Amino acid sequence: MKTFTLFWNSAESPAELHPMLEELGRFHPIAPAPPKAANLFFRRSGHGLEVTKKGDAFHIAYSSLHLAARGIGLALAGLEECIIPSFRTVGALFDVSRNLVFTVPQFRKRLRQLALLGYNMVMLYTEDTYELPGVPCMGYLRGSYSLEEMRELDEYAARFGIEMVACIQTLGHLGQFLKWPGAAGFRDTDDVLLTDHVETYELIDRMFNFWSRAFRSRRIHIGMDEAHLLGRGRSLDFHGYENPFGIFKRHLARVGGLAGKYGFHPMIWSDMYFRLGSASRDYYDSCAVIPDEVRETIPRNIELVYWDYYHTDPGIYDRMIDRHVKLGFRPVMASGLWSWYRFWYDHRYSAERVKPCIESCRRNHLTELFFTMWGDDGAYCEFDSMLAGLAWASDLCYGNDGDDRRTARLYRAVTGGDYETVLLAGRINYQLPGRDNGAGTISQLFWDDPLMQQGFRSFNALDGDWYECCRRELESARRALRERALPESGDGGDLRYARLLFDVVIAKLHYQNQLRTGYLAGDREKLAGLLREELPGLLRLMARFQAAFRRQWLNKARPEGLEVIQIRNSGLTERLRESGRRVRAFLAGEVSAIPELELPCDTACRPGERYHQIATGSGLI
């Protein structure tokens, strides 16, 4: 794509745009110029966004600061647009609670990129990764953010018309905080706060005090999702059994009152109401019944956030939105760009779910939508690759009909990256035919122990041909990726890391398959060849991968949390060495068998998606 410079004149450009233009000019070809040299012109209008090209000049008519920012991004890409947006809020949620905490400079860069794509709201999901004065266990050893850092990000976001919204937890999902002895007094269960206790509400008051001083927005997301064992821990000891509906209602009322003290307008994840009305505790249970007395006690001063990252049927979104409306709420929608349980952004899986979600939101006249990027099980996704999903999703929200060529131009202008190549690298997210890939097939197989082979054996039980299908798909994608000329620079994902990821995954799966089949067939020559030729190369690849993972992590995040993945990768490396020792002992006649390789395939003991469920059948202590 041809690069050109956008010149703007300060006297002819609205003053509200000057801070944005000056800051963007430090990183993009945008510069001030005398009136006669200008080729970028702005005009405030009452409706939407219009970007038109007249000769060599771009004219941007905008109705809000964030639309002006998107207009600049489009102009950098040489694109035109004329829209009245369907959504007044297009947001992104970054999970900084699952070990990866972005550095402040990196997050400033994220904000610039999001602005040029048209985002106007950003949530930082912080369970415990912020500092609370007087609460030393909050964020301990977690790379937590200070009040000053949050203020800096809020000030920076405001230049681009982006609202920073705190997204915290005030009931469940607080296991990282509650695990410390100093937090024991706040604990109901390992993950849930103790309700109806004065100390708990003093803690929550401190949370609100922090965020009231950190961000200028008076909107705050207070969580309250997935508190599955509410009232079943120490609360049961103190108060006896009580219907969770009553506990939840009472707690929300008290927390809502504290939020009001600071002028906050809270929102919560809506699942607890639907789960508590479901016999199976299923959020999406079509038979869930929320009693009238509960419906009537839902506070009217909160917003409900309907989250759904899973469904491909637009009818399910329609039905769930309607159920929220019947509760008396038009929900905020939270969709998902799949980064969790993955090493790289999964566009295919995301697109199959995001498109019907956006279509349903339009049909049902929802006006607020944001895209979550979770980090479950260690946040090991290469997060720069997520920018491709953010570019695609924003284009969809602003009416693009799915023209990837257009999105690719915008993506390159904003990030310097190659959109098609980033999506190609996403083919690392292989999915077993007919099996939902929410758990992340490749991450299950990558950390699958080479001797115990829980993943291999469970997949063999599901489909005896899965390995060959997987190998062919990964080999095909690797060849295509190797044929691509990679950009020398850019922020759209580390594609050299992606190439190495393919190499190490393919080699590891090949070794594991050959080890099992060779042993079960009694093929001693094959086993000897593995030790001589395959294992040394795989160990070298693991060393390179460990170094590459460290590099891409530290390029964007604080060091806390990296140790988790280093421990996993180092553990896998040692287990690969151990497999070699065991095979040598077997071939030398020192042992008569390798019992782990003789275990049968059984779906009843299929491992879960998390590392501790994949790497071992024992307890990680």
Image (spheres, rainbow, N blue to C red):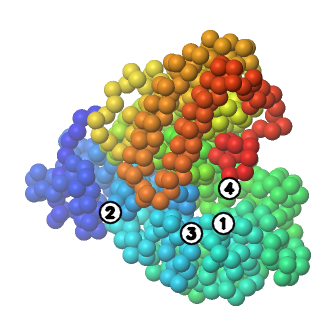
Amino acid under disc 3: Asp
Q: Amino acid at mark 1?
A: Gly
Which quadrant holds residue 23?
A: bottom left
Camera-near label (2 vs 1) is: 1
Do the numbered discs 2 and 1 sit on residues whose CB atoms are within 8 Å? Answer: no
Report how far apart the C-alphas of labels 1 and 3 lie in the structure.
9 Å
Which comes before the other along the chain, label 1 or label 3?
A: 3
Q: Earlier in the sequence, mark 2 or mark 1?
A: 2
Quadrant in the picture for the C terminus: bottom right
The residue where tag 3 is placed is 128
Instruction: State whether residue 16 appears in this view.
Output: yes
The residue carrying mark 2 is 44
Tag shown at residue 175: 1
Real-space Cα distance between discs 1 and 4?
Answer: 16 Å
Q: Given contact means CB atoms under 8 Å apart, are the residues at marks 1 and 4 in contact?
A: no
- Inspect the image, locate mark 2, and give the three-letter code of the amino acid beneath it: Arg
- Residue found at the far front of this picture: 590
Distance between mark 2 and mark 1 Cα atoms: 48 Å
- Residue highlighted by disc 4: 621
Q: Residue at x 38, y 63 (%)?
A: 104
Q: Using a 10 Å C-alpha cutoff, classify the residue at mark 2 as few (fewer than 14 neighbours), some (14 to 19) or many (20 or more).
A: some
The tag earlier along the polypeptide, 2 or 4, is: 2
Q: Residues within 10 Å of mark 3 (few under 14, many from 20)?
A: many
Q: Is residue 235 above or below residue 321?
A: below
The residue positioned 66% from the left and 13% from the top of the image is 524
Quadrant, the N terminus: top left
**Where is residue 586 shown, x and y percent of the image?**
68, 22
- State yes or no: discs 1 and 3 in contact (Cβ < 8 Å): no
Residue 462 x %, y %: 77, 28
Q: Secondary structure at mark 1?
A: helix
Amino acid tagged 4: Ile
Dot 4 crowding, Cα within 10 Å, few <14, some 14–19, many 20+: few
